Amino acid sequence: MKTEEVIKILEDNKITNVVKHKPKIIHTKKFSCADDHPIVWYIFDENNKAMCEYCSTHFVYEPKDFYDKAQEEKELLGMGLKDSIRQKEEREKKKFVNEILKGSG
Ligand SMILES: [Zn+2]
């Protein structure tokens, strides 16, 4: 087989593309890609694999450890959780102030 023929087969099967774009390891379920194109956000599917529609970069999801997963879940919960924490802190603060007032009274 001639070299040109091999190259043509590789190109037809987009094999050169795969070789060019090594899979990127991502540690969060949600990630962005902005490789020579406008920023796009993706979320990994159940196979923990994704491909950028713009630049054909492959992504592989690899959880770092349990702590990071917990952090990520917290981020996904977002403002709702932050608000509830803040409210709890304020309640605790008020309680604390009341205790001081009672003590000094
Ligand atoms: Zn991309």
Image: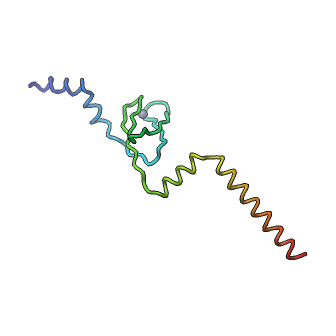
Which residue lies at the image location 15% right of the left edge and 26% below the top edge? 6
Residue 36 is drawn in which quadrant?
A: top left
- Furthest-front residue in view? 46
The answer to whether residue 61 is left or right of residue 70 is left
Which residue lies at the image location 72% right of the left edge and 60% below the top edge? 89
Q: How is the image coloured?
A: rainbow
Image height of 67 relative to 40, above or below: below
Which residue lies at the image location 61% right of the left edge and 46% below the top edge? 78
Across and down, in percent, residue 16 comes to 25, 31
Image height of 22 relative to 73, above or below: above
Residue 100 is drawn in which quadrant?
A: bottom right
Which one is in front, 46 or 93? 46
Question: Quarter holding the N terminus?
Answer: top left
Q: Ligand 1: which quarter?
A: top left
State the count of labels: 0
- Furthest-bottom residue in view? 104
The answer to whether residue 2 is left or right of residue 36 is left
Question: Quarter holding the C terminus?
Answer: bottom right
- Furthest-right residue in view? 105
Across and down, in percent, residue 23 comes to 34, 41
Which one is in front, 50 or 14? 50
Across and down, in percent, residue 60 comes to 37, 43
Which residue lies at the image location 42% right of the left edge and 29% below the top edge? 54
Which one is in front, 1 or 60? 60
Across and down, in percent, residue 68 comes to 49, 55
